[in-house]
Amino acid sequence: MTLTLRTRVVLAACAAIVLAVVLLAVGVSYLIEGQLRSSLDRSLRDRAAEVARLSVTAPSLLRVPGALESSSIGGEQLSIEVLDRRQRVLARSLSLGGAFLPARLVGRVVASGDARYANGRLGDRSIRLYVAPLPVSAGPASDGAVIVAGTTGEIAETLDRLHLFAALSALVAVALAVIASLVLVRRAMRPLERLAQGAAALERTGDVARRLPDPRTGDELGRLAETLNRMLSALERARTAERRFLADASHELRTPVTALRGNVEFLRRHGPDPIVLADLDSDAGRLSALVHDLLLLSREDAAAPLEDEVRLDRLAQRVGAGDARIVVDAPAPVCVRGDEAALERALVNLVDNARRHGPAGGRITVSARAGGSVATLSVSDEGRGLSEQEAARAFERFWRGRGAGGGSGLGLAIVKATAERHGGRVGVAGSTFTIELPALPLTEFSGGPGTTTSQTRKGWS
């Protein structure tokens, strides 16, 4: 079973709080237990020191009834036994009654002269023992030992109360965490639910003009909604451009098709006519060129990944070969990663555009250069070029400038699609059209066919 996001958040919050309470309880319990045991050990040691002084200064008082009675922290009675060097009991607390304190450490303490702590039991009670040697004196306890014992029941009770309090605190914390998490998650999920409802409405209607509701939170959710709305805007623009393209393509195809049908109908009625046949040939050529350009444009929109290494300088020289009007400016190797046929087609389109709009017999300059990480392929003619308004629309599909003649209006659009598929861009300034592409560093360029190893190693110097 898959848990909802709300349930997972609540469970995570509860688990975190329980873990924090448990760790806090364990830490506090450890500290308090250590503090209580240290306090008890200090009381045992201090009382043993008092008995040792008494055995030296007034040994006769040790046997006085009640002289060894004392209490520790919290009013708990301390039990005392004084033994001589032969481990015979000389004096003891009245609270012991008929019981005797464990004396297994006395021999070692007397022999070594070092005091020791130990845990033991007195009847059904757990006790803490402190065994200390007595100094040599004239009294009967000379060179003996004193045993001071205190019950640890109070420590155990304190720890039990602490554990109970921690358990109750954990339960209360879990209850509060559940309530707080539900409230906070509900408030946090409300904008997300609105986004989901908006997305469902988009799916149901298919209307990309609609937008997701703005949660107005200013956090990650708000940025997500903003990003999705920008994506919807891009989709709307793409769909609008597609519809406009289809409408323009239909309009462009209608004219030659209508002319073809009219001429065919004329021939059917009146027989062959040289002028009509010439019109038929012209219309068929125009239709063929338009269909060819549309096919090229669709291929650019859905082309394969770019894997070839292309020398733009060689491409420029190949396109300019055999035409006296074209001047190639490619003094150094320029390499990019891309589709060589598509790049050559884009360059040919620019050259054809320059032939069509440049002055008759004017020079056309084809340039291929590299600057840093950018490779530039440009074509310019000696015409007056485009105005700013014309340059802004030059690469739109089916746009034709002044004196466009019989062009399909897709040549520059194909150039733009090719450049963008290669990760670059196109631009125009006056009569100079430029394609900018990411340059391939010469150190990565394998050289390609006809390139010698020494040329590649020297970086084409």
Image (tube, rainbow, N blue to C red):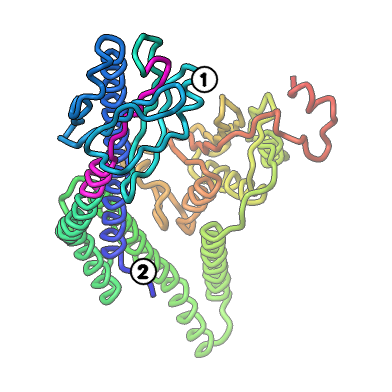
Q: Position of residue 399 (x, y in %)?
A: 39, 54
Q: In the image, which is nearer the foreground, mark 2 or mark 1?
A: 1
- Classify 398 as above or below 162: below
Q: Position of residue 255 (x, y in %)?
A: 42, 71
Of residues 294 and 193, the one nearer the viewer is: 193
**Residue 184 visible at all:** no
CA gap, disc 2 to disc 1?
112 Å
Of residues 130 and 160, the one nearer the viewer is: 130
Q: Amino acid at mark 2?
A: Ala
Of residues 182 and 175, the one nearer the viewer is: 175
Q: Quadrant of residue 121?
A: top left
Q: Amino acid at mark 1?
A: Ala
Q: Secondary structure at mark 1?
A: helix
- Classify 430 as above or below 299: above
Find out whether residue 39 is within the magenta segment: no
Q: What number is the disc on residue 247?
A: 2
Mark 2 nearby-residue class (10 Å; few <14, some 14–19, many ≥20) = few
Q: In this figure, which residue is indicated by the disc labeled 1? A: 111
Mark 1 nearby-residue class (10 Å; few <14, some 14–19, many ≥20) = few
